[in-house]
Image (cartoon, coloured by chain):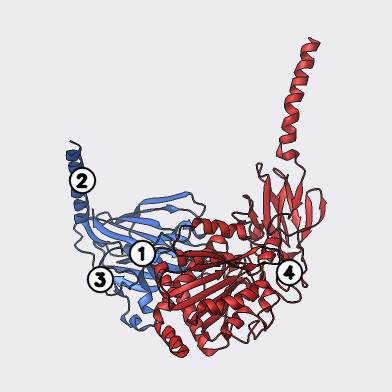
Chain colours: A blue, B red
């Protein structure tokens, strides 16, 4: 009887996982093939240089590498260092709602010259803009509708003084192409160790742009850590 | 009725009296440095204001190391007045657990060398220091965590004049002879405690059962001497500038310090002609300019300078720690205080025929390029250095072959 119950439970779990996977249009957790530890993701699974000429830079192979994260129990993650990459394929997004999620971590000096937008995760068309880490004095983790990346613009959800460095923050964006709005949720841990959660629903796509019904491109620019990226039809 | 009232008063007195004597508030205020690493001169205590200064303990020039504890101040707020030249840029280190863990009080808490501290109600003992002291007991705790490691061998390099063991640690895969020999020392200047956390990070990674640890041990055998001035560390000496010269000026024909004499014998014998990389870990002065960075002192030899450049490029590229290292800070040979100083350890190491890189590394006490230096971030920097070293060794098998050919 115990065995039967176990089989039913296991079978249900497999079906659920299969269903979840089937709904996922694109998933990259950087922990399994085709991703390889200590290797660049450029040329793998659709990741490419934003500008092909960047491939000629001496440090180009190191700008987007899967590495063992020494601050995260050696788990693999994508390390971005002065990166400028893009990917343009997200499978067939079959519904009016699409959920994007990923994890970001950053590291910065608490008392040093500021670099402004140090990390940007940009979605094109730019109607639902970008997620960023703004390293300027009044910056922090935030999001912005127009994708222009200007310093001081956008909504700061966690000021830099409260960010725990080298700790992942999970971002979830639920896009509604029908309503031309999106929901933003961010969770993680603050510098003082307390839990952090942010949510904003129904944020309008940039009103100055033409309506959109799909994601065309993702750009990853700057320095930080990126992990557990998924794009799913909902 | 009178009798009952008297009994109640007497009972109340009996109950209250012991409470007063055992209350922390009833303890007299005591400030001392009578423990390992302790160092302070209390000049005056007037009300809630205490004037203090570091005890030079034989060092000829003014230096800034101090470490004291306060008892009997629970619930009080005291002001501690130092000369501003002996106060670090993030204020004093504060420990509420007898020196096991530390936090900076913060720059905002300090004005012109003076800081005020509100002692928590239950804090029977609070320790303060110019840094985050690291003593033999801290290293013993580290060793205890790794006591079952098959790669670790703890030995005694020599005895100090005061009879203490000078501890030496060797790390390597048993039964194999790695191609490279890597040695690291710290506390030639005993006050420079933040270097010990770097050493601990380096050791931790060399012992680790992960890709970096395995890679390091595949290529190299390690020798560490964590306290080159063991007596000075435990006595709470300044060490820097100790007359007639300090431990890091003692690599001369006739060294006067037992630790230096022993290392001069041990290191060449242990390395057995294998290509040797030698790190001597230090902290610079307390603040300002280059002293608020992590920096390496470039060797004079072009070959070694190039190897250092490569190693620091790897460190800059692959670092993941809280201290963000920039190789731009490398102090070129012939500039600043990076000159041909007689008797320094890294200079002596470079003079050995099998040395491929001998280098001094300086890590700021509290602030490195805007990043907080503390026990954790310094350990992480040590781990980052270990990772870069592993990449360097992996990329240069030819250095081992060349040295072997040269030896034949």
Viewer-closest of A89 and B214: B214
Q: Nearer the viewer's eye, disc 4 or disc 3?
A: 4
Secondary structure at badge 3 equals loop
Q: Nearer the viewer's eye, disc 1 or disc 4?
A: 4
Q: Which residue is mark 2?
A: A10
**Separation of marks 4 and 3 at Cα, in angstroms:** 58 Å
Question: Which chain is mark 1 on?
Answer: A
Residue B380 visible (yes or no): no
Viewer-closest of B387 and B258: B258
- The answer to whether tags 4 and 3 share a subunit is no
Q: Which residue is mark 3?
A: A46
Label 4: how many Cα within 10 Å (few below 14, some 14–19, many 20+): some
Residue A77's tag is: 1
Earlier along the polypeptide chain: callout 3 or callout 1? Answer: 3
Q: Which residue is mark 4?
A: B63
Residue B286 in percent (x, y) is at 67, 69
Residue B264 in percent (x, y) is at 61, 78
Secondary structure at badge 2 equals helix
Q: Residue at x 76, y 29 (%)?
A: B17
Question: Which chain is mark 3 on?
Answer: A
Question: Which chain is mark 4 on?
Answer: B
Tell me: B183 left or right of A7. Answer: right
Residue B167 in percent (x, y) is at 59, 65
Quadrant of the frame with the N terminus of chain A? top left
């Amino acid at each position: 009887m115990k065995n039967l119950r176990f089989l039913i439970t296991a079978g249900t779990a497999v079906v659920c996982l299969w269903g979840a996977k089937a709904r996922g249009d694109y998933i990259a957790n950087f922990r399994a093939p085709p991703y390889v530890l200590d290797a660049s993701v450029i040329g793998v699974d659709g990741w490419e240089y934003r500008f092909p000429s960047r491939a000629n830079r001496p440090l180009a192979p190191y700008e987007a590498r899967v590495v063992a994260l020494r601050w995260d129990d050696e788990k693999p993650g994508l390390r971005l260092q002065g990166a400028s990459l893009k990917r343009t394929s997200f499978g067939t997004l079959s519904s009016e709602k699409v959920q994007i999620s990923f994890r970001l971590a950053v590291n910065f000096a608490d008392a040093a010259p500021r670099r402004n937008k140090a990390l940007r995760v940009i979605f094109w068309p730019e109607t639902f803009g970008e997620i960023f880490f703004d390293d300027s004095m009044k910056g922090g983790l935030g999001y912005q509708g127009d994708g222009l990346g200007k310093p001081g613009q956008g909504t700061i959800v966690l000021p830099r003084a409260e960010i725990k460095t080298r700790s992942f923050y999970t971002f979830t964006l639920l896009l509604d192409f029908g309503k031309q709005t999106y929901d933003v949720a961010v969770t993680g841990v603050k510098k003082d160790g307390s839990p952090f959660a942010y949510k904003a629903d129904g944020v309008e796509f940039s009103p100055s742009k033409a309506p959109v019904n799909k994601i065309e491109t993702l750009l990853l620019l700057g320095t930080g850590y990126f992990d557990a990226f998924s794009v799913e039809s909902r | 009725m009178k009798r009952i009232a008297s009994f109640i008063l007497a009972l109340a007195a009996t109950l209250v009296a012991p409470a007063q004597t055992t209350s922390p508030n009833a303890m007299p205020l005591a400030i001392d440095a009578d423990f390992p690493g302790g160092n302070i001169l209390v000049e005056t205590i007037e009300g809630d204001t205490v004037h203090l200064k570091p005890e030079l303990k034989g060092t000829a020039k003014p230096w800034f190391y101090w470490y004291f504890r306060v008892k009997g101040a629970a619930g009080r707020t005291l002001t501690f007045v130092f000369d501003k030249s002996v106060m670090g840029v993030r204020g004093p280190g504060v420990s509420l657990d007898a020196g096991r863990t530390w936090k900076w009080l913060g720059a905002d808490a300090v004005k012109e060398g003076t800081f005020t501290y509100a002692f928590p109600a239950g804090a029977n003992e609070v320790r303060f220091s110019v840094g985050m002291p690291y003593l033999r007991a801290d290293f013993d705790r580290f060793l205890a965590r790794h006591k079952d490691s098959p790669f670790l061998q703890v030995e005694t390099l020599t005895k100090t004049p005061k009879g203490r063991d000078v501890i030496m640690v060797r790390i390597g895969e048993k039964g194999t002879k790695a191609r490279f020999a890597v040695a690291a020392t710290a506390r030639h200047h005993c006050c420079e405690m933040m270097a010990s956390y770097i050493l601990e990070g380096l050791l931790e990674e060399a012992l680790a059962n992960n890709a970096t640890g395995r890679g390091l041990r595949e290529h190299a055998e390690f020798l560490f001497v964590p306290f080159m001035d063991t007596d000075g560390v435990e006595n709470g000496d300044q060490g820097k500038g100790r007359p007639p010269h300090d431990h890091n000026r003692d690599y001369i024909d006739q060294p006067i310090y037992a630790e230096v004499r022993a290392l001069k014998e041990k290191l060449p014998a242990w390395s057995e002609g294998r290509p040797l990389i030698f790190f001597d870990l230090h902290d610079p002065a307390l603040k300002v300019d280059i002293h608020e960075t992590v920096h390496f002192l470039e060797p004079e030899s072009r070959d070694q300078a190039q190897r250092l450049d490569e190693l620091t490029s790897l460190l800059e590229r692959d670092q993941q720690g809280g201290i963000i290292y920039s190789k731009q800070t490398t102090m070129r040979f012939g500039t600043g205080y990076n000159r041909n100083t007689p008797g320094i350890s890294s200079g002596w190491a470079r003079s050995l025929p099998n040395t491929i890189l001998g280098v001094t590394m300086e890590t700021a006490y509290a602030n490195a390029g805007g990043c907080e230096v503390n026990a954790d971030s310094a350990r992480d920097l040590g781990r980052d250095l270990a990772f870069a070293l592993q990449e360097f060794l992996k990329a240069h098998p030819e250095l081992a072959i060349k040295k072997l050919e040269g030896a034949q």
